[in-house]
Image (cartoon, helix red, strand yellow):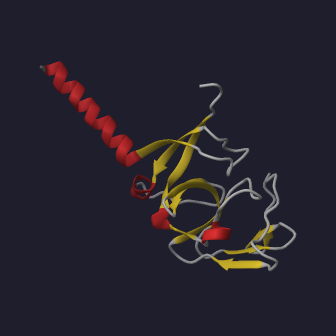
Amino acid sequence: MELLARVALLALVVWLVLTYGFLICQCAGQHMFPAMKDGDLCIIFRRPAFDLMGQKLAAGDIVAYRMNGERHFGRVVAIPGDTVQIDTNGSVTVNGVTESDEILFPTYTRGDLINITYVQSGTLYVLGDYRTNTEDSRDFGPIPNEAVEGKVISILRRRGL
């Protein structure tokens, strides 16, 4: 009986951690290629637990978010108070500084105009790494904090699993 009680307690703790602390899901699509590939498993630190610990999302973090009922992954490019400019040549400028990370694909605007966005409080500007083949803040606008599921903390590569 004591063993059964311990197993039940352990199951409860695991359920609480996986429900409110972490999320394990599979990446679908190539939106974050090469950082994440289709089929990779992601461990996500859920947003409520993240906020509870006083953590803040920063530029460069990979987040999972829900838009139009679908889960998307993207890299935070700008936080509240930042100004993002995407020009027709495919370069991204945040607060006057041109992005120089190792992004393999150019960032085109959606149309022929220069896209300038001020990131308001309670939102994040998120772009996928495979920028020629993704939906992100260029389509949705800045992502509201409520849509962010959490921060990706680990990626487990699928190699014939």
Direction right: furthest residue: 89
Q: Residue at x 79, y 70 (%)?
A: 97
Q: Quadrant of residue 156?
A: top right
Which of the two residues, 115 or 71, is positioned nearer the viewer here? Answer: 71
Q: Residue at x 68, y 78 (%)?
A: 117
Q: Residue at x 68, y 50 (%)?
A: 32
Q: Position of residue 150 (x, y in %)?
A: 49, 54
Q: Quadrant of the C terminus?
A: top right
Tell whether 23 sits left or right of 132. Answer: left
Q: Position of residue 62 (x, y in %)?
A: 61, 52
- Is 97 rendered above or below residue 45? below
- Is 73 rendered above or below residue 117? above
Q: Residue at x 55, y 59 (%)?
A: 57
Q: Quadrant of the N terminus?
A: top left
Direction left: furthest residue: 1
Tell whether 10 sits left or right of 145. Answer: left
Count how many numbered circles sit on residues in the image: 0
- Is 25 rendered above or below residue 160? below
Which of the two residues, 8 or 41, is positioned nearer the viewer here? Answer: 41
Q: Position of residue 148 (x, y in %)?
A: 50, 60
Q: Position of residue 73 (x, y in %)?
A: 60, 53
Q: Quadrant of residue 50?
A: bottom left
